[in-house]
Image (cartoon, rainbow, N blue to C red):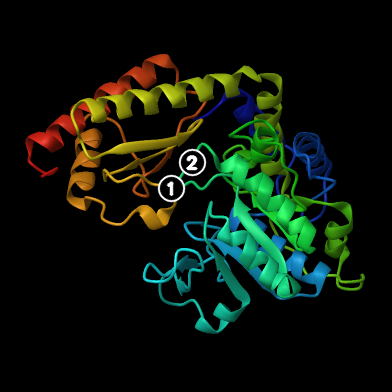
Amino acid sequence: GHRHPEIEAAIKARSELGWMFGIHTTSQMKLATLLHEASPCAERVVFCNSGTEATMYAIRAARGFTGRERIAIFDGAYHGAHDWGMWAADPSSSRDAPDKVPMGRGVPRALAELVLMLPYRNRAAFDLIRENADSLALVLVEGVQSSNPQPLAGEFLRELAEVCRSCGVLFGIDEVITGFRLAYGGAQERFGVTPDLAAYGKVLGGGLPVGAIAGRADVMEVFTGLGARNGIFSGGTFSGNPLTMEAGAAAVGHLKAHPEIYANLEQRGDRLARKINDYCQSRQLPVQMKNVGSMFHLFFQRESIDSMRDVTAPNVRAEKAFYLHALNRGVLVPGTQRAFLSAAHGESEIDELIAVFTASLDDVQAEGLFA
């Protein structure tokens, strides 16, 4: 939620001591220790300023460690706004071996040769990794795709990790969204999988800008500097600033002290999705809600969705009308349609969401937009 008293107190206390020094502080050690304890892979931790920076540095670290330049990502994924993450599957290409296209203008097409696009939750991805293993530095995957939250994501992650290890390719999980959300230990804890590298952001900063790279000690050694063996450059004036570190430590510390938060989020997210899906099925509405715990996404189509390649003909008019009706009833859903519950959402807020969503769906149906 907003203005949590423990986080607000931590920010105020730190601000009285100063918040920008450009050097390492004990505040970094406080948050790094919490991340080390929570994340199965976090033998070492490096802080940066955002999730985008975290995935960017994870990719650079993998290249420095392996000496290889190519990376692999999955269709439907989002790994930040740097050029390496701004690629999508070409919808006209093969589902088992998708080609890729840039996400908008400004992404150099020359980089395409260094990015391998893999099909999400499709075993054909494993064959592509094996075929390209000699050139791949890293296979990067979201703990759960926020664009497509699938309950069986964990089964795929575990098998993917084994394929990468058998091929000698580093395996990375983008925990920018799933870290400290799906469980205290993120997707790693929830699904029982340990990557070589992980990227963090969002929850870790307690509401302030943050990013972090965590991973195996030997891989993370590349961050010791350009003079080190396989050393890479990393840095940032505000990376690990004490204001963010104290806010993050307060947020993560609260989550550690209150593990019941995760059971509550899981139950409430599942209840919301179940009620909306039951309502849509009872009225034969071409709408479905996908969720994993507190992550949820509404899709305005009847056809089943396994990967984002299955989102073929969404009813955009109905979708826009639904969100406008929900807004008019006091519920704001992000324009990306990727939505999340927080610990501040209790049972009464879930009841309100269900009432607003079902009433808004009725409005859309009455307007004939589902025809």
The residue that disc 2 covers is 150
Residue at image location 37% in from the left, 25% down from the top: 274
- Three-letter amino acid code at the position of disc 2: Gln
Quadrant for the C terminus, please.
top left
Q: CA distance from mark 2 to mark 1?
A: 7 Å
- Residue 167: quadrant of the picture: bottom right
At which x and y percent is residue 357?
Answer: 26, 29
Q: Left or right: where does residue 352 sit relative to residue 239? A: left
Callout 2–callout 1 Cβ contact below 8 Å: yes
- Three-letter amino acid code at the position of disc 1: Asp
The residue that disc 1 covers is 306
- Residue 351: quadrant of the picture: top left
Query: Among all residues in the image, which is located at the extreme bottom?
Result: 110
Query: Among all residues in the image, which is located at the extreme top?
Result: 348
At which x and y percent is residue 221?
Answer: 88, 60
Residue at image location 31% in from the left, 20% down from the top: 352
